[in-house]
Image: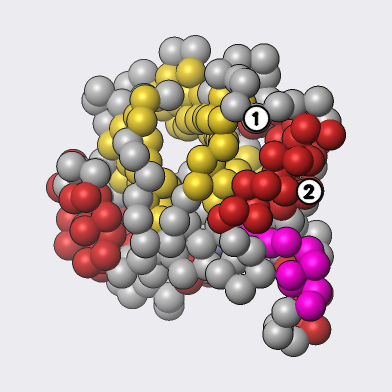
Amino acid sequence: MRFSVLASGSTGNSIYIETDGYAFLVDAGLSAKRMEQQLESIGRSMKQVNGIFVTHEHSDHIKGIGVLARRYGMPIYANRKTWTAMDGLVGEIPTEQRFHFDMESVQSFGTLEVQSFAVSHDAADPMFYVFHEADRKLALITDTGYVSDRMKGHIQGADAFVFESNHDVSMLQMGRYPWSVKRRILSDVGHVSNEDAAVAMSEVVALKETRIYLSHLSKDNNMKDLARMSVSQTLQTCGIVTGEHVHLFDTDAEKPTELVTV
Ligand SMILES: [Zn+2]
Ligand SMILES: [Zn+2]
């Protein structure tokens, strides 16, 4: 399977995944026009997309969903509570395009298996996805206040991770956000810090070539270099030297990552 992180960060999130038979998006958090441009820049077209899996109803994940659904008629997958929460935010989506993807369930599309799992975040019923094809595994996990053992069990041993590395704790604490917002981000239903993400990563990477995409970086409370450095340092204290079998990659709010094979 191949994938690209089309956009990542609080201004919009979307990930593209394809096999030889299918193409999907996870979330469409940019405007429909921007989503189309992001796909074109990796040599793909929205017309090829067979469906969109929604993680949760925050606008940085669903902004383009309504327009794309109406423009291209593709199926949209979300769990029941997320559908209810999305209604009113995405406009009319025809019944025949509304599909249920239950929490902690698996759906198959040809050779591709998609597994959903719960995360801890302040949305109706937030969940992320793991993609399996043959013996390859791609795990997506952002928008979670912490990484539980149950989540670790789902993402364990993936060949590639799109992993939240949201903020640097001291930048957040010293920054300009009001205390209520800081408290929300730091809470169990907010976002994971660079250090906490790295500790969780150290427990789920296997002894094989592994790509980790540092994702959903806060624009105000993180920087790519800082995220990379602190994740790398924390991994090292956990016995993992990056650049050996574990490789870190940046993601960007504007520019898609290279389409790579997992
Ligand atoms: Zn988000
Ligand atoms: Zn969110």
Residue 167 percent across, percent down from the top left: 68, 62
Task: From the image, tell me which residue sits under label 2.
Answer: 196
Left or right of residue 133: residue 84: right
User: Which of pointers 2 and 1 lies earlier in the amino acid sequence?
Assistant: 2
Q: Could you tell me which quadrant the N terminus lies in?
A: top left
Q: Residues within 10 Å of mark 2 (few under 14, many from 20)?
A: many
User: Against 16, is 120 above or below?
Assistant: below
Residue 7 percent across, percent down from the top left: 40, 56
Residue 18 percent across, percent down from the top left: 31, 32
Instruction: Please identify the quarter of the rendering in which residue 72 is found.
Output: bottom left
Q: Is residue 249 magenta?
A: no
Give the mark count: 2
Q: Is residue 171 magenta?
A: yes
- Residue 31 appears anywhere in the view: yes
* Camera-side residue of 93 and 198: 198
What residue do we see at 59% from left, 61% from top?
Answer: 223
> Which residues lie in the magenta part?
164-174
- Residue 83 appears anywhere in the view: no
* Camera-side residue of 254 and 65: 254
By what rule are the colours in the image chosen?
secondary structure
- At label 1, the amino acid type is Thr
Task: From the image, tell me which residue sits under label 1.
Answer: 242
What residue do we see at 83% from left, 31% from top?
Answer: 238
Residue 37 percent across, percent down from the top left: 21, 58
Instruction: Please identify the quarter of the rendering in which residue 236 is found.
Output: top right
| Label 2: element kind | helix
